[in-house]
Image (spheres, coloured by chain):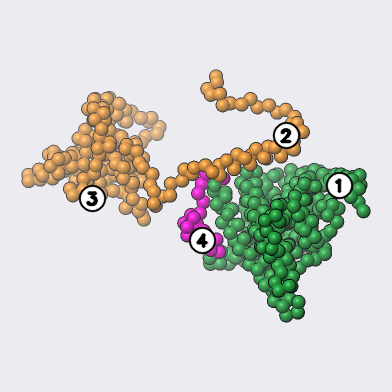
Chain colours: A green, B orange
């Protein structure tokens, strides 16, 4: 592959992933409203276009047209920086996710992944951890008690749950022996999904993913019943839109990560029996991955409209007293099982 | 006394391990919400669909005309007396010769006003009316831009000759029968004495004065 074609291929991949991420996040807002409505015996938005399919466009237009308000007592630079960081870090995470196997065009391999970092998991965690700065800075710069409380809650919550999340991933790394997401996805061909080998780790990871994306029942940073709007109380117009949008992008990326880590990524059992062409397999892999992602996005929303919000002390108890000991126990059990089944080399 | 068998005895016992895990409870809760996903929605998409009103819906009033097109109202003031919200006022006038086609009786309401902001749509005026003149209909009261416009006068209340208001749903034979007998009860329960004998500490203006010229 020449440098020129490499640049073109990478450029196309980056643009495609970026566009798909934004598109999925846009329609997640629509899906959220529809699913919320259906779970509550309502119809939901159905005025903009057939079945309200153009509702996200209407929302976007509204967001852009709204008056932009920056409180005079706020720290203006940080006030603008907050949503920018939230949006930036949300968009960065899609880089290492393997969206499918490689396409073979003219004897050249084109992996359907922007870049295969050999420390993909570490990169992912690093970027996700940066996401909290957007909320924290936004909440602090607003110079508002509710925003500040929301920001504090967000930072403590995300730091607490990152520990349990990281520990649950250590057990996964022990079994897979790799930090590269492509490698982890490739290992799960057939029915060798990691959820079979790491059920407890999977559960902990999903719970922590809810907390990391600030979704109900862990949406204490916004917590509209007690904190007005939490960290985005003072935000308006597209800055508010960025915060909300970042949450949906995070949800999409989290669903992609959960699918890749534990639910086989782009793999689908038995598909190799009928389809042999590698290009078709790659395309089907993308489809399967997106089916899984859609399910998890639905799952995120389903949980949101079922469970009530945790109290703050309950959240901390769950994080520090239950999830972290459980994830350490998971590591120990994984180690013992690997030692006695002789899968340690 | 037990009225239904839906009540549950609350016990605050220690939760078992399975209960403390919460996962079974969360799972059953999610199944409940999921079952609602496919349920039939009770939504009425308003501008396209409208909810059907009951036949005896009490909406905007109408002052009926008789079969010759003459106004039935004789400005007796019973509706104003019966009105618990004191929304009705009227001024009576004597019918001049040659106006027989306009007014049925010798006395008629020169001015008849209902304050729609005060009206509670109880229907007592309709029940009190001895001349079958005022009725509540299934029409909704229009919204206005100011308070003054919501004091409806005769121009709005009296039905037009071209399109008379249909009251057949309200005036079933049973209702007509009931109204025939009701005349006497009405005088016993709603007579003026009960309204004048009020708590002296909290006197309320009585509508008698406004009816003075009737």
Residue B152 visible in the shown view = yes
* Marks 4/1: CA–CA distance: 48 Å
Mark 2 / mark 3, whichever is N-terminal: 2
Q: Position of residue A192 (x, y in %)?
A: 77, 50
Callout 4 secondary element: loop
Instruction: Provide the residue span drawn in magenta.
Output: A39-60
- Identify the residue under disc 4: A54
B133 relative position to A12: left or right: left
- Identify the residue under disc 3: B155
Mark 4 / mark 1, whichever is N-terminal: 4
| Direction top: furthest residue | B1
Instruction: Please check whether the numbered discs 4 and 1 fall on a single chain.
Output: yes
Chain letter behind tag 4 = A
Eye-nearest disc, 2 or 3: 2
* Marks 2/1: CA–CA distance: 26 Å
Residue lying at 27% horizontally and 37% vertically, measured from the top left: B169
Chain letter behind tag 1 = A
């Amino acid at each position: 592959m020449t440098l020129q074609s490499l640049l073109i291929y990478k450029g196309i991949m980056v643009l495609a992933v970026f566009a798909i991420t934004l598109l999925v996040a846009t329609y997640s807002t629509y899906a959220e409203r529809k699913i919320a409505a259906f779970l509550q015996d309502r119809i939901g938005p159905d005025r903009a276009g057939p079945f309200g399919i153009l509702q996200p466009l209407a929302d976007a237009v509204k967001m852009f047209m709204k008056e932009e308000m920056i409180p005079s007592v706020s720290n203006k630079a940080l006030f603008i920086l907050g949503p920018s960081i939230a949006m930036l870090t949300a968009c960065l995470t899609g880089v290492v996710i393997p969206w499918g196997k490689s396409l073979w065009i003219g004897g050249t391999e084109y992996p359907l992944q922007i870049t295969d970092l050999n420390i993909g998991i570490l990169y992912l965690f690093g970027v996700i951890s940066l996401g909290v700065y957007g909320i924290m800075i936004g909440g602090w710069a607003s110079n508002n008690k509710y925003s500040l409380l929301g920001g504090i809650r967000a930072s403590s919550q995300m730091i607490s749950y990152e520990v349990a999340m990281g520990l649950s991933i250590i057990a996964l790394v022990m079994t897979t022996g790799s930090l590269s997401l492509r490698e982890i996805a490739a290992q799960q061909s057939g029915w060798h999904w990691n959820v079979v080998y790491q059920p407890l780790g999977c559960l902990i990871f999903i719970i922590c993913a809810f907390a990391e994306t600030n979704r109900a029942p862990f949406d204490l940073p916004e917590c509209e019943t007690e904190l007005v709007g939490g960290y985005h109380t003072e935000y308006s117009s597209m800055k508010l839109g960025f915060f909300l949008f970042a949450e949906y992008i995070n949800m999409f990326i989290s669903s992609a990560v959960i699918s890749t880590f534990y639910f086989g990524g782009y793999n689908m059992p038995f598909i190799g029996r009928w389809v042999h062409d590698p290009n078709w397999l790659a395309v089907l892999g993308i489809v399967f991955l997106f089916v899984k992602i859609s399910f998890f996005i639905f799952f995120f929303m389903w949980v949101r409209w079922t469970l009530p919000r945790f109290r703050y002390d309950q959240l901390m108890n769950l994080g520090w007293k239950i999830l972290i000991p459980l994830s350490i126990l998971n590591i120990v059990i994984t180690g013992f099982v690997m030692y006695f089944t002789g899968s340690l080399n | 006394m037990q009225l239904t068998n839906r009540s549950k005895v609350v016990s605050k016992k220690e939760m078992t391990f399975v209960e403390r895990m919460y996962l079974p409870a969360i799972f059953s809760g999610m199944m409940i919400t999921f079952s609602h996903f496919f349920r039939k929605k009770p939504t009425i998409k308003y501008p396209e669909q409208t909810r059907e009103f009951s036949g005896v819906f009490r909406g905007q009033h109408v002052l009926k005309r008789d079969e010759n097109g003459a106004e039935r109202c004789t400005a007796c003031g019973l509706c104003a007396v019966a009105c618990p919200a004191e929304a009705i006022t009227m001024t009576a006038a004597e019918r001049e010769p040659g106006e027989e086609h306009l007014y049925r009786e010798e006395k008629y309401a020169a001015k008849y006003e209902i304050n729609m902001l005060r009206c509670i749509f109880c229907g007592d005026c309709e029940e009190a009316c001895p001349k079958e003149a005022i009725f509540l209909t299934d029409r909704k009261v229009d919204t206005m831009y100011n308070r003054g416009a919501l004091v409806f006068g005769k121009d709005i209340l009296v039905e037009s000759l071209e399109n008379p208001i249909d009251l057949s749903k309200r005036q079933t034979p049973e209702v007509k029968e009931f109204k025939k007998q009701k005349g006497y009860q009405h005088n016993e329960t709603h007579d003026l004495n009960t309204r004048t004998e009020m708590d002296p500490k909290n006197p309320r203006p009585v509508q008698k004065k406004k009816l003075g010229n009737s």
